[in-house]
Image (cartoon, rainbow, N blue to C red):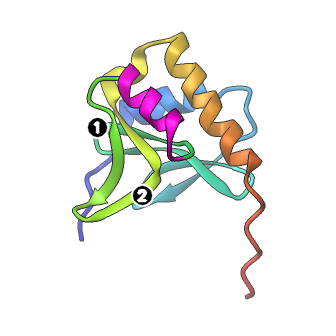
Amino acid sequence: MKFPKADPQLAHLLEESLAGLEAHPRPMFGCPAWFAGSHMFAGVFGEYINLRLPPGPEQEEIMAAFPGAQVFEPFPGRRMKEYVSLPGRQARDGPAWRRWLRRSYDYALSLPPKPQKGK
């Protein structure tokens, strides 16, 4: 399956917004993504920025705060329940956007480390 190309301006915006955080980039679905520890917490997919948040009230809150936000679905029928997709234009919302990005980062850091894969 062919995935949409990441908007380079959104990738740059996300990278700038992560300044000061210990996040490392790595491609996911052929698009830029950022990891805290061993867990992905943010990425760009087409014209959307995806943030990892626990399912439930936090996801409902962010979807209410950012019109057009929805649970991330990289292709039909394959929902990633811990990720919310924000239309890229919403990420330019300054302080509110940065607070949600930080919450996503903190959530990823709260997760137990993934086990090392054997080589």
Magenta segment's dominant SS is helix
- Type of the residue with mark 1: Glu
Judged from this view, the residue extending furthest toward the bottom is 119
37 in the magenta segment: no
Mark 1 lies on residue: 47
Q: How many marks?
A: 2
Image vertical order of residue 109 relative to residue 102, above or below: below
Q: Position of residue 48 (x, y in %)?
A: 33, 38
Q: Secondary structure at mark 1?
A: loop
Residue at (47, 37) in percent of width and height: 59
Residue at (45, 28) in percent of width and height: 62
- Between circles 2 and 1, the one closer to the viewer is 2
Using a 10 Å C-alpha cutoff, classify the residue at mark 2 as few (fewer than 14 neighbours), some (14 to 19) or many (20 or more): few
Q: Position of residue 38 (x, y in %)?
A: 71, 58
Q: Position of residue 105 (x, y in %)?
A: 66, 38
Residue at (41, 17) in percent of width and height: 92
Q: Position of residue 8 (x, y in %)?
A: 37, 36
Mark 2 lies on residue: 80
Pick whichever, 83 or 93, lies toward us.
83
**Magenta stretch?**
55-65
**How far is the residue under mark 2 from the one under mark 1?**
17 Å
Image vertical order of residue 82 relative to residue 64, above or below: below
Q: Give the quadrant of residue 47.
A: top left
Pick whichever, 114 or 27, lies toward us.
114
